[in-house]
């Protein structure tokens, strides 16, 4: 069965959002594996590779402090705590994939998928904000190849429905 990683990222975002909300509310029973397990049930057949969702969600939870520290200077006008929870978790997923999954997920796919999550679940300007922040992270991490510098279009992958344009500058994540 083919893997549907886009759906996997949606489930991961939903799970991370719930985990963060429950943790901040003082829920001592919040456990990312249990949350993912509950959220994955309706989509298991369509999803295929459930381990991708667990790995991504666990990885983001384990690295949240590091990811937030790295995200802070990328959007200095927006302290991480003031960014909408959906946008904050989309940024964490995107940065996690850029840093820790670039062997299995091409960087431009990670950015494109994060932008798509922001379009679907964030506010009006979320996708531009996410694109700008992750585009800066992409450059800061040195992930640009010679092809990127020569402005060739990225080759679409199985995960990517359409190639992403060059990252833009960050805009207001709240749509104001």
Image (cartoon, grey):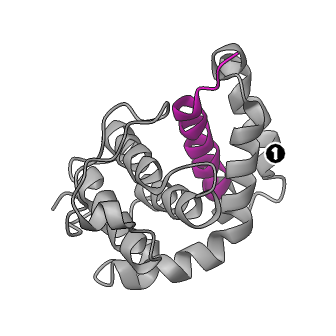
Magenta span of residues: 1-21
- Secondary structure type for disc 1: helix
146 over 120 or under it: above or below: below
| Coordinates of residue 147 in the picture (x, y in percent) | 32, 60
| Coordinates of residue 60 in the picture (x, y in percent) | 66, 60
Whether residue 5 is in magenta: the answer is: yes
| Residue 25 seen in the current view | no
| Coordinates of residue 160 in the picture (x, y in percent) | 42, 36
**39, 66: nearer the viewer:** 66
Point 41% across, 80% down: residue: 140
**82, 67: nearer the viewer:** 67
Q: Give the class, few, some or many, for how many residues have Cα within 10 Å of label 1's Cα (few <14, many ≥20).
A: some
| Residue 22 seen in the current view | yes
Point 64% across, 26% down: residue: 3
Circle 1 sits on which residue?
33
With 102 as the anchor, is 39 left or right in this view? right
Q: How many numbered discs sit on the rendered protein? A: 1
Residue 36: quarter of image: top right
40 over 152 or under it: above or below: above
Point 63% across, 58% down: residue: 20
Point 53% across, 36% down: residue: 10
């Amino acid at each position: 069965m083919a893997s549907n990683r886009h759906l996997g990222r949606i489930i991961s975002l939903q799970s991370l959002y719930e985990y963060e909300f429950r943790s901040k509310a003082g829920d001592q029973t919040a456990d990312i594996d249990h949350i993912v397990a509950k959220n994955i049930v309706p989509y298991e057949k369509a999803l295929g590779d459930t381990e991708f969702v667990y790995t991504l969600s666990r990885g983001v939870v384990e690295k949240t402090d590091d990811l937030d520290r790295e995200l802070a200077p990328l959007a200095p006008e927006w302290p991480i705590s003031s960014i909408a929870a959906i946008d904050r978790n989309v940024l964490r997923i995107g940065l996690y994939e850029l840093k820790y999954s670039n062997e299995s997920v091409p960087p431009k796919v990670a950015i494109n998928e994060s932008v798509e999550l922001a379009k679907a679940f964030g506010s009006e300007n979320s996708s531009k904000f996410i694109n700008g922040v992750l585009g800066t992270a992409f450059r800061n991490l040195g992930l640009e190849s010679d092809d990127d510098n020569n402005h060739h279009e990225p080759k679409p992958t199985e995960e990517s429905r359409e190639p992403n344009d060059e990252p833009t500058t960050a805009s207001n994540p709240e749509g104001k």
